[in-house]
Image (tube, rainbow, N blue to C red):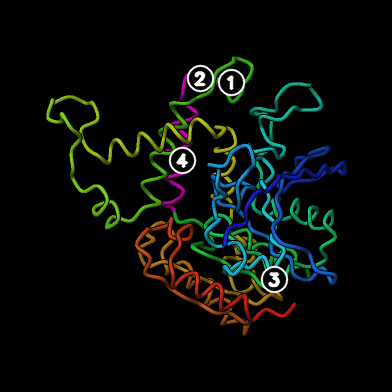
Amino acid sequence: MCIGTVIPQYAHFAEPLTLQSGAVLPAFDLVYETYGQLNAARSNAILVCHALSGQHHVAGRYADQPENLGWWDNIIGPGRPLDTERFFIVGVNNLGGCHGSTGPASLNPGTGKPWGADFPVVTVTDWVSAQARLADHLGIEAWAAVIGGSLGGMQALQWAISQPERVRHSLVIAAAPKLSAENIAFNEIARQAILTDPDFHGGHYYAHGVRPLRGLRLARMLGHITYLSDDQMAEKFGRRQRPGAGSYSFDVEFEIESYLRHQGDKFAGIFDANTYLRMTRALDYFDPALEHGGDLAQALAPARAGFLVIAFTTDWRFSPARSREIVHALVRNGQPVAYAESGCAHGHDSFLMEDAHYHAVVAAYLQRIGL
């Protein structure tokens, strides 16, 4: 059953927030949405953390935008794995985002102009700190669960480390304990596409009335390739050519080229380049074991949560081996963890899909959570 119509909400935080970099935000806003009802004990709340290009609109539709369906609507709602008849679900747009929360396009109170390149780099740890303030605002002492896929899964992991008394279960999906060199390389190429766009203007393109659309478009095209599996691309596109192909030019000849250009254009029309730079850098910096000499088990030792870790066999960007690193560290500590691998064919994007096995695993785990 669908959620129906939803309304975004806004929270202002006047208390300064010191970031991991040492920079201080004097104040900030977060935009969020909620689904279901918070129970009297305030014990049934689940935080949904978004991935790189996600935001607070996780489920349902807007009354004035009926076509704008939440990005994880297939898993949230009455009778669905994240059952709104039992849980109170919260989705939030992260600090540094471009969908209503304070970010590079927001006004810098010190200058009265958009922050632009002056907006500080934020990390997964910073997001957890800001989200904890949102939990305070909502009167939630501890989350029944924190859940997310990809970069969202990293946040779920960091919550269990940074706020061990405030999260009872952590669901880490299609994630990794840190990026590989290959993944950092993909992010760097994407950033260079933006940074070298003539319309970037050092990050202060707002003042010039332009946006680095070409760079952002290329960044998304590159990223999108890594989110799909080779088998899925072969099945969906193969080497099929467009009508009129064979011109021996550099126009769109193959269906896959057309698809990537469409995805790039669509993304560039709705996302902010400065936010994209910060989201990818947050991915790069995530490494909770770094300050423990690379010992992930030691980094996870403070956690008091139960864990569900899910990986997808077709995900080559964050392969199951990376998820098993998390599992092995938790097992080494004697911490409670359940692990599942799904054969969903959609590569890294599988965590967004309505896959029966994957959803059944999430549902079964959450049904056992005591409230």
Check disc 1 and report the residue beneath it.
205
The picture places residue 202, in percent across and down from the top left corner, at 57, 23
Check disc 2 and report the residue beneath it.
199
Precedes in sequence: disc 4 or disc 2: 4
Given the image, on which type of amino acid does mark 4 rest? Glu
Q: Secondary structure at mark 1?
A: helix
Tell which of 310 and 285 is nearer to you. 310
Relative height, residue 354 to residue 60 (above, below): below
* Image quadrant containing the C terminus: bottom right
Tell which of 359 and 249 is nearer to you. 359
Relative height, residue 59 to residue 106 (above, below): below
Given the image, on which type of amino acid does mark 2 rest? Asp
Instruction: Report the span colored magenta.
Output: 181-200
Tag 2 and tag 1, C-beta contact below 8 Å: yes
Given the image, on which type of amino acid does mark 3 rest? Arg
Tag 4 and tag 2, C-beta contact below 8 Å: no
Relative height, residue 112 to residue 53 (above, below): above
Tag 3 and tag 1, C-beta contact below 8 Å: no
From the viewer's perspective, is the residue at label 4 or at label 2 nearer? Answer: 2
From the viewer's perspective, is the residue at label 1 or at label 4 nearer? Answer: 1
Q: What residue do we see at 74% from left, 44% from top? A: 30
